[in-house]
Amino acid sequence: MSTPDVILAVDQGTTGSTCLLLDASMQLLAKHTHEFPQHFPEPGQVEHDPEEIWDSVCRAIADALAKSGVHPSRIAAIGITNQRETSIVWRRDDGRALHRAIVWQDRRTAGVCESLRDRGHADRVRATTGLVLDPYFSATKFAWILDHVDGARAAASRGELLAGTVDTYLLWRMTGRAVHATEPSNASRTMLWPLIGGGWSDELCALLDVPRQLLPEVRPCTAAFGTTRGVPGLPDGIPIHGIAGDQQAALFGQACFAPAQAKCTYGTGAFMVLNTGDRIVPSRHGLLTSVAWQIGEQTTWCLEGSCFMAGAVVQWLRDGLGMITSAAEVEALAASVPDSGGVVVVPGHVGLGAPHWRAHARGLIRGITRGTTKAHLARAALEGIALQIADLARAMAADLGQPLDLLRVDGGAAANDLLMQLQSDLLDAPLDRPRMLEATGLGAAALAGLGVGLWRDLDELAGRWQRDRRFEPDGDPVAKDELRARWAEAIACA
């Protein structure tokens, strides 16, 4: 029998589930993605069916193994990374979800958050958790399910229900319903986990009306989380050794192991994360303070800014407006004009995240003239993505007390050269794009490999990071200042 030398990483994202297989030299052996349906029951509401998520994960694993020719006996460990904040409540006995998963983009609990703010709880939540009172996070989603499914609260009080983010749900399924656990990077995004002291907060559980007994055990990111049992296509007994939320996993996969190193992932949304080392840095500029990862007893912290619409803006141009037939077409269309012709697109379709935090904001197109074409709209859409990130970078620099001198980028939209050049221009800083854009899955694999001993330490992992291309800032400073001014005016109107 061959020695186990392959890591299987499950990257469960907002629109699809991806499985990656990497060997001991961190070379990608195979990758496969299965998309799953998005459900929009009401304006501002976004849901996923947990069974459709699970099916997409199982199919991605099977197809990646088939592509690679890797025998499952070679799998040394499994890592999991997940769309964070997306919340599921399910029955302990048979695993049936009480309700579709409420996705991180969902805004249905905005009124609850406003009520909590009006009652004076925002500062306490912020100081305790590093988060703002916003429907983005898991706690109000858990409470909504319990309040809107008949008998749910009574069942919870009887110990019949379990709750968790998607990592917890997948772990529970992959271990044959044996393990109900998570790790600190996901726990710190629920609004129920205090930054200091750790452990679920009785005070926050009471405030947000989430019974503590529903919540999972919390273990370090590289801990032993259990072994596979009953997973289609996989033998029982494969250890699961690495879990982290997708953006923290991407920071890890980008080898941003030192304080002041930052990355931005361009997926459905865009997420900029800055490593602050062993320092908990409270934000004064609308950012979030979270756990980056915990390895053993050592916790690394981060600052994060989240934009809810990035790649989703291009999807909207394709599916909502019919301007393009594939996402890949947007770069050539946007590059066919030298600028956006004064048009500004604010991607506030599902509200504005950091540093603005306006749940009721909506998307905006401003500056249209008779001369506006779909090329101008496409370019303005890409500029809108980049301008959001520039706002985050300024907020991070202010919190950190120093400008960012380099940003590492990843995610599907990072393959768009025009977007990356616009981003470098608006940041006035270089961008490094790695050869492997699947940084979230790579981070989960790296954590699993560390946990099982396939790689020695962070230095070995850092030495394996490879750059594809560096983008340097360019362009007319006056034109950039004018664009920033138009953006500031448009943001105020969204």
Image (cartoon, grey):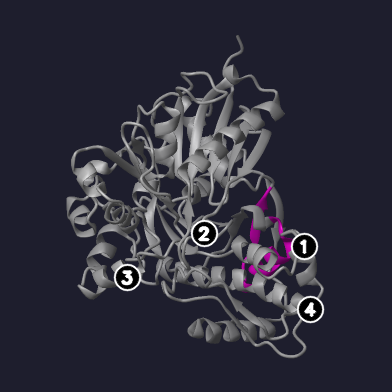
Give the numbered dot on residue 271: 2
Q: Is residue 336 left or right of residue 63?
A: right
Q: Look at the numbered discs 2 and 3 and tell me whether their residues touch, using CB distance below 8 Å.
A: no
Q: Residue at x 61, y 73 (%)?
A: 384
How dense is the environment of label 4, judged by Cα within 10 Å: few (below 14), some, or many (20 and up)? Answer: few
State the residue position of label 1: 329
Q: Residue at x 61, y 56 (%)?
A: 409
For the residue pair 316 and 98, the one nearer the viewer reads as 98
Which is nearer the N-term, disc 4 or disc 1?
1
Numbered range of the magenta stretch: 415-434
Secondary structure at numbered mark 3: helix
State the residue position of label 3: 111
- Location of the N terminus by quadrant is top right
Q: CA distance from mark 2 to mark 3?
A: 25 Å
**Location of residue 385 with respect to 247 vertically, above or below:** below
**Residue at the extreme top of the image, as rendered:** 1
Q: Amino acid at mark 4?
A: Pro
Q: Residue at x 71, y 29 (%)?
A: 67
Q: CA distance from mark 4 to mark 2?
A: 27 Å
**Location of residue 165 with respect to 232 vertically, above or below:** below
State the residue position of label 4: 338
Q: CA distance from mark 1 to mark 3?
A: 39 Å
Which is nearer the N-term, disc 4 or disc 3?
3
Secondary structure at numbered mark 1: helix
**x then y, percent, for residue 145:** 32, 53
For the residue pair 60 and 376, the one nearer the viewer reads as 60
Secondary structure at numbered mark 4: loop
Q: Amino acid at mark 3?
A: Gly
**Residue at the extreme right of the image, as rendered:** 336
